[in-house]
């Protein structure tokens, strides 16, 4: 059987941490920033982890076991 190909869009969007969790960036920080409050914009810059229910799907796209 051939090797699995990593999903190109997923490898640009997600990183796997040392403990095996998947990091992602938050949405809504690319444009229309004038109407958003300063505190909200600061929070959107920070990265967070993928939800536990979606983690297996993301890892499958990245060809990572688990």
Image (tube, rainbow, N blue to C red):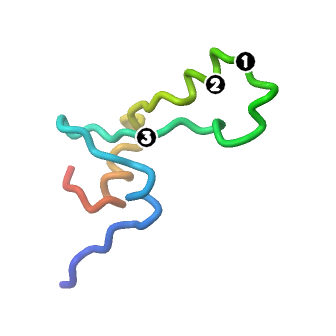
From the image, which quarter does the N terminus lie in? bottom left
Residue 20, picture quadrant: top left
Q: Mark 3 and mark 1: span between their CA atoms?
A: 22 Å
Residue 37 percent location from the top left of the image = 72, 18
Residue 34, picture quadrant: top right
Residue tagged 1:
37
Q: Mark 2 and mark 1: span between their CA atoms?
A: 6 Å
Q: Secondary structure at mark 1?
A: loop
Would you place residue 20 above or below residue 10 in this image? Answer: above
Residue tagged 3:
24
Would you place residue 34 above or below residue 23 in this image? Answer: above
On screen, residue 12 versus residue 62, left or right, reads: right
Residue count near mark 2 (Cα–Cα under 10 Å), binned few <14, some 14–19, many ≥20: some
Residue tagged 2:
41
Which of pointers 2 and 3 lies earlier in the amino acid sequence? Answer: 3
Q: Nearer the viewer, residue 22 or 65?
A: 22
Q: What residue do we see at 38% from left, 52% from top? A: 57
Q: Secondary structure at mark 2?
A: helix
On screen, residue 45 versus residue 14, left or right, reads: right
On screen, residue 56 versus residue 1, left or right, reads: right
Residue 31 percent location from the top left of the image = 73, 41
- The count of marks equals 3
On screen, residue 19 versus residue 27, left or right, reads: left
């Amino acid at each position: 059987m051939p090797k699995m190909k990593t999903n190109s869009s997923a490898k640009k969007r997600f990183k796997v941490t040392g403990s095996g969790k998947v990091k992602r960036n938050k949405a809504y920080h690319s444009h229309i920033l004038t109407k958003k409050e300063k505190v909200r914009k600061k929070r959107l810059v920070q990265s967070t982890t993928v939800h536990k229910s979606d983690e297996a799907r993301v890892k499958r796209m990245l060809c990572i076991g688990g």
